[in-house]
Amino acid sequence: MLNHSIINKWWKKLSKKSASISPHSKKMFWGISFIIVIILILTIDLFPSNVNLETGQVSKRDIEAPMTITYVDEEKTAELKSIAAESAGRVYEEDRNIENRIEKDINGLFKQIKELRDEETAVDEEMTAVDGKNREELIKDIEANYPVITLETIEILLETPPDLFNELEQRSVNTIKLKLKERIHPEDLPEIREELVQEVMAMDLNKEYRLVLANIVETMIRPNMIFDEEATKKKQEEAVKKVVPYKHTIKQGEMIIRKGDIVTSEDIKELEALGLQRPQINYLSIFGIVTIILTLIVMACLYFYKYQPDVWEAQPKIILLQLLVIIVLIIAKIIDIIPAVNYFHLPYLVPVAIASILTTVLISTDVAVVLTVFISFLVAIIFNNDYNIALTGFIGGLVGIFSVSKLSQRNDLVRAGFNVSAVMVVLIMGLTFNSPFRGWLDLLGYISAGVINGVLVAILANGLLPYLENAFGLTSSVKLLELSNPSHPLIKRLLVEAPGTYHHCVIVGNLAETAADNIGADSLLARVGAYYHDIGKMKRPYFFIENYYAADNPHDKLSANLSALIIKSHVKDGVELAREFKLPESIIDIIRQHHGTNLIAYFYQQAIEETSEHDNVEESDFRYDGPKPQTRESAVIMLADIVEAAIRSKNFNKNNHNRIEGFVRELIRNKLIEGQLDESDLSLKELDIITESFVKVLTGIYHQRVEYPDSLLKEMKRVDKSDKDRDK
């Protein structure tokens, strides 16, 4: 099993080798490497493989399937869908007004002819004009209105006797009405017309009039069933949905093409399914993907540079973010390569939330949100721009972030995984119902993928967190909470070996936590750092005043220089002890920085008094080695340490609040003037808040107590004595 320290040692070795390289060059190197890796992951499918055959070409070698796959034959599936759509048939709607419209048309025809007949009857034979038009023009008008009616029919009807004329009109209407009782589709019209002609020709009429009637009914009949395009399309779509994709299985080792065989389109299809065939480089797609990647990276860099300068300047954090992106993308790529499984949507397995959770725990919530957006877009590109996958990844990531934003124990990571599963299930159901529904088995498979996603997130988060903490020197709240446990070996040793120091550390922890919380710093780190800041005193506990139990002061027998050296050494001893117990670098930094370069004034003054006028006392021998506090948390602990020790050395019985406040302000002001806080980024406003926080806590500790009356004290002693006598 991989040991945590292996990654840590590797990282330190790499850091030493790159120590001579400038930070800017390192950042450029890692940034360019990151971009190249992402581009390769997202575009690898777009480059030609070793097999690049064309239909009709003779294969120069045997090609076997490197793995067993089942793939969807899109061409045959499309063919099945086309057949299903055609088999679904057309949808027709009955035209309930067609009978009235045809009757109106027939009546209109006979009306026009009748009007022409009446006009001709009203004028004498030499008068040919009717309403300013001659007979031929009026007939042409009728032909224009009824182009399907022949001129011969019109001529015969003009000469038909009135009774027979009316009979022909009625027979035309009745014949068509009778036929319209049947369902007549557009494609049935030729056959219907033949039937009508046969029926008319069998009527008991003069042949001449039978032909007239046949011409009228044949041309006037129309379908009473109208094609419903929208309903037909819907019916075809439903039929297509029911089509099961045609799947073809290729087994590992199966011969795809033998040497000398002519390559067919089916061979090409199988090679493509196996990922062995790429006809040509898709330069446009590569350009598009690279453009998207660079745009996302530029936006992320601008965000970190402007709004997260601490992250931007911290190379380990940037590399951690890059690593998390690459891990998720590699998992997504592997899932993309895996052959499709019936009723199971593999892309929903991509654990985007793992990067979100680890970033939240190790860096910050804000950075985690930005990283989640970044990864979600890139994952969508891997799955052919499926932005449903981007949406589920993004929402799942946000749920993970919310779930661990106030992490209190390692089990919260498991709870976060369950939360991701629950939300993924709900979201997947919504997306499934919002798209063409493929059946309950598909839905069940999709939901299963969402549940497994959350389980993967929980497993990976718990598994990767310790390694990442050690490798990148970052400290999670989980680790800090574990270190704050009183049962930790170092804390237990401190309590036994240096009890005075232990109680001092606890009070400093309370002071530092309150102040850090009020200025928006990491209060948990401040509290835990305070617990461990003086562990170096365990090496020589009785040389520190809080651990004196006898009247003798061990420093009375030592020179001022040696005493100062012992006092200073507790910082170095603390760092060594912290490394021995594998404490995080953030805690070790606090141990190293909590005294800054302060002067050990008591022994410095003593050395001056002990030294003759001809000897010089080097001030540097009586100063801590530093460095000065580099973070707000280290600075807060330095101030809390100084304030607690100084306040404890004073006697505050009356007017505690005002005296404590004045004393604390003076102590902090001195450290500000000495320049001990110059590198900590604390503002004057924050120093004022820290002062108020310290005063509030210390006032509660050193509050004025009510003095008991003598009579009450005597009564308490009497009761105590009687209790002891009874026990005997």
Image: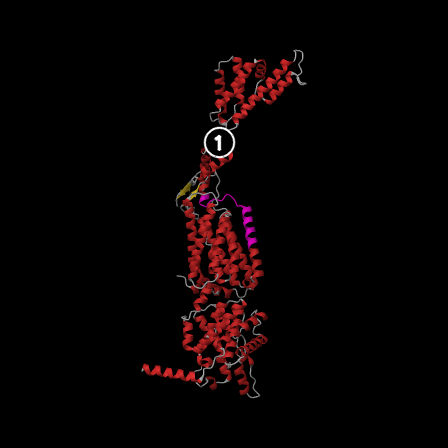
**What colour scheme governs how the chains and residues are painted in the rendered image of this protein?**
secondary structure
| Picture coordinates of residue 271, whole percent (x, y) | 45, 43
Tell me where residue 407 appears, x and y as whole percent.
46, 62
Is residue 225 shown to the viewer in this render? yes
Residue at 45% across, 70% down: 579
Q: How many marks can you see? A: 1
Quarter in which the N terminus is drawn:
bottom left
- Against 39, is 602 above or below? below
Residue that mark 1 sits on: 92
Residue, far front: 711
Residue 424 placement (x, y as % from top left):
45, 52
**Residue 628 appears in view:** no
Closer to the camera in the image, 94 or 556 = 94
Assign the C terminus to one quadrant of the image: bottom left
Task: Answer few, some or many: residues within 10 Å of disc 1's Cα (few below 14, many 20 plus, some between 14 and 19).
Answer: some
By secondary structure, the bulk of the magenta-drawn segment is best described as: helix
Residue 73 position (above or below residue 418) = above
Please state which of residues 454 and 429 is positioned toward the viewer in this rendering. 429
309 vs 251, left or right, is right
- Report helix, strand or loop for mark 1: strand
Magenta stretch: residue 283 in it? yes
Residue positioned most to the top: 125
Examine the rendered structure and indicate whether residue 155 appears above or below residue 79: above
**Left or right, residue 400 beside residue 122:** left
- The answer to whether residue 504 is magenta is no
User: Looking at this rendering, what residue extends furthest in the right direction?
Assistant: 132
Where residue 145 sits: x, y (%)? 60, 22
Amino acid on which the number 1 mark rests in the picture: Tyr
Say if 722 sits above or below 337 in the image. below
Return the residue nearer the eye: 30 or 314. 314
Question: Where does the magenta region start and end?
Answer: 272-296
